[in-house]
Amino acid sequence: MALEDQSKQIMLDAWGTEAVRAALYDENETELTTSGYERQAISWTYDSGDVILEADLISGEDYIAQFDINPDPSITVSYVKYLTDTGDVLATHELGNDEEVYNNPGTFDILAASLELV
């Protein structure tokens, strides 16, 4: 059975309504707890031309979420997870070669995110 685009839109819209937070995790899949860190709110827009859900940029910025990281000791950001308001994980993105190591305070920006049903 193949899904029609309208069915995909319904599912993507529902997912985007629930996945309203982004969070960062270390290499052990433990959420960061550094000073100043907090989960970030995100929103999504369905693109009917490509049957894809795209995360919205923060108004006036070039990122969808920005996190403050104040490591003590150093920390590696290995995963971005998308969560419900109550903290249930709906999706995990492993950064792989794009992992970032923080030895000093800095920020981690999520520049883009999308979800596509094929």
Image (spheres, rainbow, N blue to C red):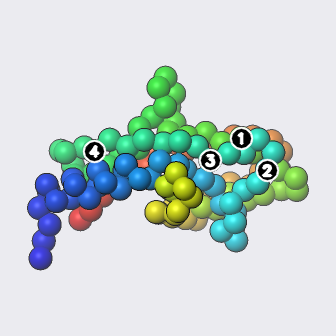
The CA distance from mark 1 to mark 3 is 10 Å
Most extreme residue toward the right is 73
Q: Depth-wise, is mark 3 or mark 4 nearer the camera?
A: 3
Let me know if residue 114 appears in the view.
no
The CA distance from mark 1 to mark 4 is 28 Å
Most extreme residue toward the front is 86
Q: Is residue 54 left or right of residue 1?
A: right
The residue carrying mark 4 is 46
The residue carrying mark 3 is 39
Give above or below for 106 relative to 62. below
The CA distance from mark 3 to mark 2 is 12 Å
Q: Earlier in the sequence, mark 2 or mark 4?
A: 2
The CA distance from mark 2 to mark 4 is 33 Å
The CA distance from mark 2 to mark 1 is 8 Å
- Discs 2, 4 touching: Cβ within 8 Å: no
The residue carrying mark 2 is 34
Residue type pointed to by label 2: Thr
Q: Depth-wise, is mark 1 or mark 3 nearer the camera?
A: 3
Let me know if residue 20 appears in the view.
yes
Most extreme residue toward the bottom is 1
* Circle 1 SS class: strand
Residue type pointed to by label 1: Asp
Where does the image place residue 26, in percent across and percent down from the top left?
A: 69, 63
Q: Residue at x 66, y 42 (%)?
A: 67
The CA distance from mark 3 to mark 4 is 23 Å
The residue carrying mark 1 is 68
